[in-house]
Image (cartoon, rainbow, N blue to C red):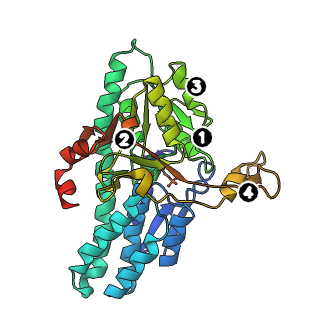
Amino acid sequence: MKVDGTHYRSLWWDESKGSLQIIDQRWLPHDFRIESVETIEAFATAIVEMRVRGAPLIGATAAYGMALAMANDPSDESMDKAWSYLNATRPTAINLRWALDRCRATLRAIAEADRKDAALKLAHEISEEDVGICRAIGENGLALIRQIAAKKPAGEPVRILTHCNAGWIATVDWGTATAPMYRAHDEGIPLHVWVDETRPRCQGALTSWELGSHGIAHTYITDNAGGHLMQHGQVDMVITGTDRTTRRGDVCNKIGTYLKALAAHDNGVPFYVALPSPTIDWTVEDGVAEIPIEERDPRETTHIQGKLDNGSIASVQVTPDGTEGANHAFDVTPNRLVTGLITERGVCAATTEGLAGLFPEMAQAA
Ligand code: MRU
C-alpha cells in the first residue's frame, strides 16, 4: 500500500544489500523508519520487540530468518537451531510455526549445497502467497460489505468496527481485516471505520495511520466504547483479524476481541473474522483450553508511548510508582460468537464443517 505516494510492502528483500528490509513498527505512526535485518539474532529481536508484528508478517519474517540461517550454514543442525530459536520468539500467532515448519520440511528434502538459494526462494514464495491470500480475502469480504451497503440509503456509510491492526503492515500487503475495507473504498462504497485504540500497544493508531493514508473515513475510539456504539445502532459489522483459529473456528486475537464479540452478539451485530488459511491451527479444537496466550512485559500497561508536543517520541508512566501490571496479549472468542470467517477461498461458518468444507485437503492432512 502507499505511504506518502510511494508503494511499500511491510517487508522486502534488497538484492544489492543481500538482506531483508522491514518497517520498524515501534515508531509508527509518528516516524517511518526502515531497518535492515542481517543476523539471526536481529530477526528474533525484530519479532520479540514487535518491530514486525501481526501474525502473517511474523511468519513471512521467520521464513527470511530461515533463509539467512541456510546462507550461513545449510546443515540440518543449523536448520533445527534456527527453527527453535525463531519459534520461541512469540507463542500465540500460529503463522510463525506454520512458516518455520514449511521451510524445514521443504529444505530437509533438498541437498545442503542447494539450500541457500532454495530457502530464499521459499521465503519469497511465502511472502507472495500472503499477498495473494490477503487480496482474495479482500474480494470475499467486499461481497459482505456490498450486501450491507445495498440495504442502506444511498450515500450512507457502512460502519465497520475493527480491533487491533490487521492491516497491510501486519501482513505483507493489503492486510486481512482491512483488505475488504480497501476494496470497498476503492469501489466507491462509503465507509466509516470505528478503530479500537487497542491498549496497551495502541495498534489502533497503526490502523488509523493506514486508513488515513488510504483516504478511508475513520474514528479512533477507546477500547471500551464499542459496546456503547453497538447499543446505539452505530455499528453495522465488526471485522477483526486473528492470530490463531482452531479447526472448529474458535478465534484467538488481540486482547479485547472477545469483549467486542460478546457486545456484538448481544446487539445482533455481525462479527466477522478475516482468516488466512495459514492462521488455522488444525491441531487445536478448543481455543480457550489449548492456545498459549502470550504475556508481555507489564511495562507496556503501566506506560504508554506517544509523540510529545515537541515532536519527540517518548514513553510516559500512567500508573503510580510501583504499580503492578499484567499484560495478557491475546484472548479467545468462542466460535458461537463468530458470524463468519472471511478466508481466501470464501466466507464460511466458524465451525468444523465450515472450515473443512473450504479447506478439505488441510483438514484431512491434520
Ligand atoms: O501483537 P500483535 O500486534 O502482533 O497482534 C496482532 C493481531 O492481533 C492481529 O489482529 C492479528 O495478528 C492478525 S494480523 C493480519
**Amino acid type at mark 4:** Glu
| Viewer-nearest residue: 290 or 96 | 290
Label 3 vs label 2: CA separation? 23 Å
Label 2 vs label 1: CA separation? 24 Å
Residue annotated with mark 1: 197
> Quick one: label 3 or label 1, which is nearer the N terminus?
1
Q: Which quadrant of the view contains residue 228?
A: top right
Q: Is residue 194 visible?
A: yes
Residue annotated with mark 3: 228
Label 4 vs label 2: CA separation? 33 Å
- 302 left or right, relative to 201: right
x%, y% of residue 133? 29, 49
Residue annotated with mark 2: 335
Looking at the image, is 192 positioned above or below residue 214?
above
**Amino acid type at mark 1:** Glu
Q: Nearer the viewer, mark 3 or mark 2?
A: 2
x%, y% of residue 224? 61, 34
Residue 324's disc number: 4
